[in-house]
Structure formats: C-alpha cells, structure tokens
Image (cartoon, rainbow, N blue to C red):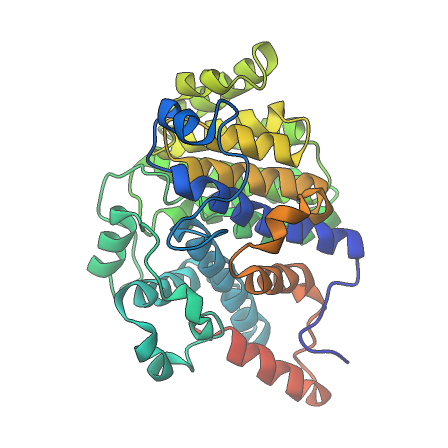
Amino acid sequence: MSIPRIASDAQLRARFHGCLVGGAVGDALGAPVEFLDLEEIEKAYGQQGIRDYAPAFGKLGSITDDTQMTLFTGEGMLCAQLASALGGQAPDFFRAATASYARWLTTQEISQRGLSATSKSGWLLQQRKLFSRRSPGTTCLSALHSNRGKVTRAANDSKGCGGVMRIAPVGMYFAHALSRERHQDRLIPRIFSTGSDLAAITHGHPSGCLSAGVLAVIVGLVLAGSPLKKAMDAAKEELRNHKSHAETLAAIEQAEALAEARPRERRVLRMMGKGFVAEEALAIGLYCALSAHDFEDGIILAVNHSGDSDSTGSITGNLLGAAAGVQAIPERWLLNLELRTTIEALADDLAAFPEWRLGGESDREERAFYTSRYPLA
C-alpha cells in the first residue's frame, strides 16, 4: 500500500494533472502582463507577444492568487468528501470551502514566520510558498474578511472573475460520478449549483456565480470524455434554468460565434471584454480553448490581450489540459512552474479519492494520513 494513493487509471490521472497544472501554467504565463494593454505587451515582448515565462513576483513561473485559490477550492472539496466518508452524511461543500478560503486568507495576512502556529490546519498551510500575496482580488479579501467565522454568501454585488477562475476543482471532483453515470443530465444541476455556490462565498452578483457554475460543469464533462462543444451545450442548457442568466449566456454564445467565424485572432478578444469580470473571463477562456490548435497555441492566445491575462490563461489552461492531458503541456513551461509538486499532488488526490480506503480497522494509517492532510470542518 502506498500513501498517498495514485489513481489506478493512468489516462484519467494525466487529464487531472493536465487540468490543474494547465491552469497554473496559464496563470504563470499571464502573470507578468496582467495589467498591460496589448500594445504594451507587444512593445515589451515583440509582435508575437509573450510566449514564455517572464519575471513576476521576483521569479520565473510564479503563480498568482488564481492558482492559490484554486488549490484551496480543491482542498475544500476533498475536506467535504472526507468528512462525508467518515461521518456518513452528505458532503457539505459550501461549509468546507468556506473554511478552506479562510485558510487561504490566513496566507495573505501572516508571514512565513507565523507558519508554525498553523501547521496543524491542513497540508496546504504547510506549503511555505503559499504565504505570499500575488495581487489578490480586493473582493475576495474583503468578503472573506467580513464573513470570517461565518458560513454565508457574500453580501456584495461583485461579478469579478475571482469566483470563476478558482472553480475547476469542482468539476474535477464530480468527473468521477459523470464517468459512471449513464444519464449525466441528472448530475449536472448539482455540479452547477456547487460551482455557483462556492463562487457566491465571495461574489454576490448572479453573473459572478453563474459563470462559475458553467465552468464547473464544462470541466467535469470534459474530464469525463465529452468534447468541449458538447460540454458547453450541456452547461448552457442548465444555465438557462437559472434567473439572471442572460448576461452569462450572451457572453458564451458570443465566444462560440467568434471562435467559428474568426478563430485565433488576438484582437478579437477585445470584443469579449478584458476578463476582469466573470462572464468575460469565461468567454475569453472558452474562445481560446475552442480556437486553439493545441495547448501552447491556446494559452499564448489567452494571455496576449488587454486585460486579466492570468485569469483568462488559467481558465484556458484548465480546459485544454483537461481535454488533452498533462502530456500536451510544453516541458519548458513545466520545468519552472512554481509549486508544481504541490499542484500535482492535489491533482492526484482529486483523481484518486474514490479509491481511498478509510473505513476498516486495517485502514487506520491511511485514514490518519488523509485526515491530517484535509482538515474536517
């Protein structure tokens, strides 16, 4: 027996790695140019734009708050799963994610010197490199600070992209059930509502939440083997069941139309906005994933625009990595990726948790390992 467990399906493991690592790669490539206009990017990096890691936060391959919060979303999903497996109740993803995002907030408020006091609060809080501010969204910070100690939705009207850019692990969690379920439409409402609810912890505007629900469904279906376009159709069908969906639906349909009529055009991205709000970031990510020849092509397109380059790069990376697997990511981008081993380890846990053995007397060692790794709410 090896702990932690590795998914027995090698192809599934590669796609889970692709999704989580791919998002981090897109995040890191976009980090140096997040607040630059396209003209400034082309002036700094040439007419082809940025194509490889450039210094950000003092190093090459630095992740931002996008990947940080994505990791804590994954932690929250697995904390809920573990509590459910041990306690026999349905997983409470909202409560577990609220606790995980509170732990992320801790990484933004204390230095590494304070790490020893929190080392028993789960595995991610033992990753020293997470204790670093990487341009965190003010909405995420203020909502989590205001609601500290409470399990509640955000009391704001923000639709910033901070809810959608972190939500891929929700789709990853549900991909296992989607793969087993003959009638996938039965699961889609639950996936959508989980993604939307987790975004609502920090973002109160419907578009900020609904965009996250859409991405969670798409990621889950792609990991379960659906083509991207088919996954998008299923997500749109569910989206239409929710109030105030028009803005998000219009953004998705514009992305689809532009990908068909004018694929891979850098300046077309401007027509979808800058990506600082949720439906725009989602639309740009979908356009780039639909248009891309391959992973590299899609990520370079996604970060070279006047806007939130790290978030659009991250969403595109989640989608393309889920579809093609980690083997599609250029090795040069993997080599210098910050926190790569941590990201891969979380991807492994999301891929393998259905195979965890927790219930028997002989499983005490494994149960102890995972309960120390993923704190019970």
Q: Residue at x 39, y 52 (%)?
A: 65
From the top left corner, tell me how far across and down residue 15 is, in percent: 70, 48
Which quarter of the rendered picture does the N terminus lie within? Answer: bottom right
From the top left corner, tell me how far across and down residue 195 is, in percent: 47, 46
Q: Residue at x 56, y 71 (%)?
A: 82
Residue 16 lies, with reference to residue 230, above or below; the image says below
The image quadrant that residue 117 belongs to is: bottom left
From the top left corner, tell me how far across and down residue 158 is, in percent: 26, 39
Asked whether 246 or 53 is in front, the reply is: 53
Left or right position of 14 against 251: right
Number of numbered discs overlaid on the protein picture: 0
Asked whether 26 or 189 is in front, the reply is: 26
Residue 326 lies, with reference to residue 221, above or below; the image says below
Left or right position of 315 against 207: right
Q: Residue at x 55, y 69 (%)?
A: 84
Residue 237 visible = no
Q: Residue at x 52, y 49 (%)?
A: 24
